[in-house]
Amino acid sequence: MDDSELGLVQRLADVGISLSAEHDLPRLLEKIVEKALSFTGADGATLYLLEDDHLVFTISRCVSLGIKFGGPSGGPVIFDPVPLDKSFVSAYSAITKESVNIPDVYESTQFDFTGPKKYDSKTGYRSQAMLVTPLLDHEDDVIGVLQLLNAVDPETGEMGPFSGECERLAASLASQAGVAIQNFRLVRETERLFESFIEVMGAALDARSKYTHAHVSRVAGLAIELATAINEETAGPYAKSSFSDVELKELRIAGWTHDIGKIVTPQHVMDKSVKLETIFDRSELVKTRYFLLAAETRASFLEKEILMHGNGVSREQIEEFRKKRDKEIASINEEMDFVLRCNNPSEFMEDYKIERLKKIAERKIVLNGETCRMISEDELKNLMIRKGSITEEERQIMRNHIDVTIKMLDKVPFVKKFRNAPFYAGTHHECLDGSGYPRGLTAKDLPLQSRIMALVDFFEALTADDRPYKKGMPLEKAYQIIQSEVDGGKLDGDLFQVFKERRVYERFSKKEKTEALLKNVSVS
């Protein structure tokens, strides 16, 4: 192999390296065409990509006319797709997977060259030689066609046919181009598959609970909206902060996966709407006890009243006896109403309420011949919850979801550019002052993305109107509570300022409503 051949091999190797290093498809396609022009000395080149049953014009260049269509440096493509019909040379090459080398298109009778001839008549150009080579992927399937026009003699500048060497070079370049394009597509398809899987998992988690059915998607959307707002900042602490498209995707993935650990949280804990709820609301058991107690009390009074009638007790005494019965029944009903009010998570339990519950729980009653407590030990424990609906043990079960999230995401082989997503997802309950969980991280450990996750997750929890234990909070009230967290050193104040000033929630809400509206539009 002489020096010229070695040089050519090296150039082809360099082309392969150059193509495989390109991560932007339009630039990759443009680079393929430019390399083809350089290697073969062609005056024009067009790259088609196969889409369904057509070859689509993607990149077209003509050196002598200074024409550029498609790609980052070219104008919009103005040519129609070519149908897969063997009468067209590009389609023939795609169908047969063969290269076609035509010395002069005006003398050829095998193919329909009406298109090139019309173009020539408009531009004054002379389409002569044409070299068409298919682009194949790793499974030997056609993904496109490279079409070269008019070989230029480097010494005379005259245009003529393509040599056998040019044909081999074009085939080699097409082979590398096909692999590069397919690799790009495989990477993108893998990324899309991964992102889709992440979103499906998040959507499945949302769907698992009838109460928090949109929390995950809202947190992801709010996080992106806040990051976008930071990109718009031109002054202040975030003037030099900016999120790239890749970083925005990474943040969205963190949003979609931040609660993935709740997949193992018991449903009755996640959806606990009242204090006595387990797999069902035990307040019905409490009601039943009181109803039975009231029924037995009435029966007992009725038996005694019958005896009073038999013993000739006066009407006045019987009336007094009935008043005593009604008072006792009313007392039972009042006590039941009190216990049921305590079951409400919005009922704040002052000390006197807790003391009364304890006294009620101490009382034993006989129902259907069996002795039982009016309120069981576990029922009492739940009813005495000061605020909300979950016990401390259940709170720990809920908190455990973040540890499970971290462990689950550690098992996922995230691609390099998304490698920080698990950390951002796993830190949405951390606080700047170190009081958060599960690791008690502080401000120095928490990057901007983690702070965004913490803020939007807290905000969504406050304002969501689908929680079983509370109504959605008005925006101003939510802002007041978040400000108190900022003042307490838990949430990022600068971030919260951007959230308010850039009206992040309003922007997100508007988009969310628009998307929901579009989903519900029927096409007649």
Image (cartoon, rainbow, N blue to C red):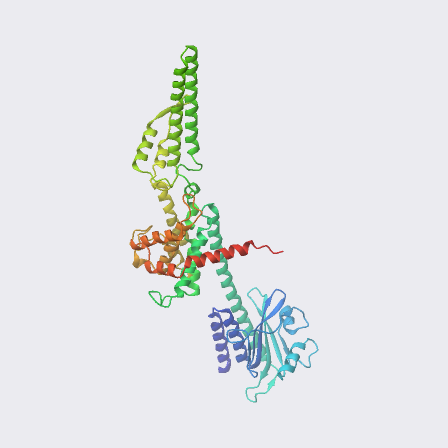
Residue most extreme to the top: 311
Q: Is residue 71 above or below residue 490?
A: below
Q: Is residue 271 shown above or below 313? A: below
Q: Does residue 194 appear in this view?
A: no
Q: Identify which residue is drawn at 65% across, 71% down.
A: 92
Residue 453 is situated, as x and y percent measured from the top left of the image, at 38, 56
Percent position of residue 393, x then y: 35, 41
Q: Is residue 429 left or right of residue 13?
A: left
What residue appears at the point 61 percent right and 75 percent down from the top-left corner?
Answer: 132
Instruction: From the top left corner, tell me how far across and down residue 330 is, in percent.
Output: 39, 27
Of all residues shown, which one is farthest toward the front? 316
Position of 184 with respect to 379 (left or right) is right
> Is residue 364 visible to us here?
yes
Q: Nearer the viewer, residue 507 or 178?
A: 507
Choose between 51 and 146: the one closer to the eye: 51
Q: Nearer the viewer, residue 341 or 389?
A: 341
Q: In the picture, which quadrant includes the C terminus?
A: bottom right
Q: Position of residue 184 (x, y in %)?
A: 50, 66
Number of numbered tags placed on the structure image: 0
- As drawn, which residue projects farthest toward the bottom? 156
- Above or below, 155 against 339 in this view is below
Q: Nearer the viewer, residue 261 or 213?
A: 213
Image height of 203 relative to 71, above or below: above
